[in-house]
Image (cartoon, helix red, strand yellow):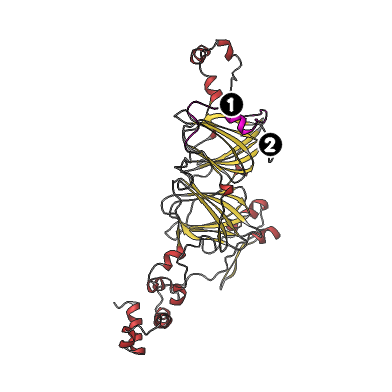
Amino acid sequence: MRSLLSVALSAAFATRGLAAVIEKRLTYAEASAIVASNIAPALAAAPTGAYASDDPNDSYYELFQEETPEAIRTRVGLGPIGADILGPQNIPMEEQYPDLLAPPSTDAGSVMNSKWSFSQSKNRLQSGGFARQQTVTDMPIATTMAGVNMRLTAGSIRELHWHTAAEWSYMLAGSARITAVNADGQNYIQDIYPGDLWYFPAGVPHSIQGLNDTADGCEFLLVFDNGSFSEDSTFMVTDWLAHVPKEVLAKNFHADVSIFDHIPENALYIFPAPVPPSIEVDCELADGPLGTTPTPFSYPLSKIAATPLEGGSVKVVDTRTFPISTTISAAEVTVNPGGLRELHWHPTEPEWTFFIEGNARITSFASTAAARTFTYQAGDIAYIPPSYGHYVENIGTGPMKFLEIFNAPLYQDISLTQWLALTPPEMVSAHLQLPIDFVMSLNKTKAVVV
């Protein structure tokens, strides 16, 4: 079977002559026009199947804020389908889930729920703060990562503890002091500010304490590299020592047994304490013979300049810039109003997404004609399995900011536009029945946000 390119070249021979083509006197633009003029009629005459729907599929998010949500969509040639709701209606919920009540016509098949909000999580209230989590129990699709939203008032401490999973964190507001000690007996003490990160490998003991230099303590996001992880399974120093005979404690610490008379019977978890002294004082008091850790447990992402893009900006952090974070990589993405985190997928790792600001919608394509659209707002979590094609659209009136987080040492994604642009244009045109000149205009550089 003759290829589309051979058809085009035959037309070129007929139009300009073999010698002109061989001598390369046929310009790029002329060749493009010839290819387009020969491919387009052939495609129009012999479509491979029905064309994709022209139904309007814009988000109903803004509409549902202004009017009572209804289970109605418009279909080309059919007019409105669905009907108004006569029975009980949870309007606040439907305002947040417009694409479930009135899904776009492009949604099809079965895709697992990919949305959770910390507002749906049971909160653990403590004297000095709170913690609420999302695990695989809440969102079964999220098998490889879990999250915690934690708040500490000024001076309050997330007590000395360690985990069986690695802990990655993003400071949302306020400031905190973190401490840690590695297996070589080296310590680390650092103050963390909004937009900064920390990472503690599994088993590394650490603590977090709220400061008062920017706010009354802090609030932060924790992400663990295990979807089944639960904060309730943390190893805490008070919990451990309460379950060791005091006689053993006396032997271990070379002290009189009476020293341990006031060890708490139950774990403290989060508890109030005085605001700590300056970091210089704390570091001096905790100075050890082996010095500090050679690799920092924190990363000042807030001080890193974002890469400006057509529709927003992005910061990427992985082991190339934050070496200790061997199991978690991330991107902080900002999308301007009307902008789009371009159509893409991540080859081997799922994406755990947290929305910091704005409103968004995502359609996850799960192959086999299955796709489902979800709407998100600040405080929501999205989870997209590996290789699922998707986009993140800003459907609000202001900037939209979110974190893409991966259980992987390196950040990787594949851009649909770049893939098509780096594939022979006649092949792309044959698949999608697009004009050759349009295909050849596609950006060969990854756009990320458009």
In the image, what residue occupies the spot 54% across and 12% down?
A: 255
The kind of secondary structure element at disc 2 is loop
Point out residue 315 in the picture as x, y percentages from the top left corner: 54, 53
Type of the residue with mark 2: Asn
In front of the other: label 1 or label 2?
Answer: 1
Q: Is residue 363 visible?
A: yes
Residue furthest out toward the left: 1
Q: Quadrant of the N terminus?
A: bottom left
Instruction: State how many labels appear.
Output: 2
Q: Quadrant of residue 75?
A: bottom right
Q: Quadrant of the C terminus?
A: bottom right
On screen, residue 335 above or below 263: below
In the rendered structure, the answer to whether residue 252 lies left or right of residue 42 reads right
Marks 1 & 2, CB-CB < 8 Å contact: no
Please provide the residue range marked out in magenta.
269-294
Point out residue 45 in the picture as x, y percentages from the top left corner: 41, 81
Q: Earlier in the sequence, mark 1 or mark 2?
A: 2
Type of the residue with mark 1: Leu
In the image, what residue occupies the spot 51% across and 63% down?
A: 106
- Cα separation between marks 1 and 2: 20 Å
Q: Is residue 234 visible?
A: no
Q: Within 10 Å of the Cα at label 2, are there few (<14), some (14-19), or many (20+) other Cα atoms? A: some
Circle number at residue 167: none
Point out residue 111 in the picture as x, y percentages from the top left corner: 48, 53
Residue named by callout 1: 285
Principal SS element in the magenta part?
Answer: loop
Q: Quadrant of residue 177?
A: top right
Q: Within 10 Å of the Cα at label 1, are there few (<14), some (14-19), or many (20+) other Cα atoms? A: few
Residue named by callout 2: 212
Point out residue 355 in the picture as x, y percentages from the top left corner: 59, 50
In the rendered structure, does residue 278 fall within the stretch colored magenta? yes
